Amino acid sequence: MTKKFAITGTPAPQRAPRTADQAHDIDHFVTGVEPQTTMTVQIPARLKRALKQQALDRDTSVKNLLIEILEAYFAQLK
């Protein structure tokens, strides 16, 4: 005995195109963190040593220390 079935072609729902804000919100939601980028800069060796020492003293990474410093600086500008 065979069963009869039919395949119907129902159109897929159309989604509205994403805006830049929506794309940013989705990226932020998915990763749970702010998107990051890479920068390469040259600084004097004495500043590199000072950053490393300060990072060790605070038990953090140089990257996180630089982020803290830059955020504090830009917060003061507002």
Image (cartoon, rainbow, N blue to C red):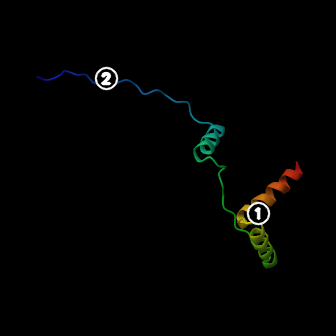
Give coordinates of residue 27: x percent, y percent.
Answer: 60, 45
Q: Quadrant of the N terminus?
A: top left
2 vs 1, front mark? 1
Give coordinates of residue 31: x percent, y percent.
Answer: 59, 48
- Residue pointed to by mark 2: 8
User: Image quarter for residue 29?
Assistant: top right
Q: Residues within 10 Å of mark 2 (few under 14, many from 20)?
A: few
Give the camera-side residue of 39 and 65: 65
Q: Secondary structure at mark 2?
A: loop
Residue ID at (37%, 23%): 10
Q: Amino acid at mark 1?
A: Leu
- Please determine whether, in this image, residue 48 is positioned above or below residue 71: below
Residue ID at (78%, 58%): 68
- Residue pointed to by mark 1: 66
Give the camera-side residue of 38 and 56: 56
In the picture as drawn, the residue positioned furthest to the bottom comes out as: 45
Q: Secondary structure at mark 1?
A: helix
- Please determine whether, in this image, residue 7 is positioned above or below residue 19: above
Give coordinates of residue 30: x percent, y percent.
Answer: 57, 44
Q: Identify the mark at residue 7; answer none if there is no mark.
A: none
User: Image quarter for residue 50?
Assistant: bottom right
Q: Earlier in the sequence, mark 2 or mark 1?
A: 2
User: Image quarter for residue 36?
Assistant: bottom right
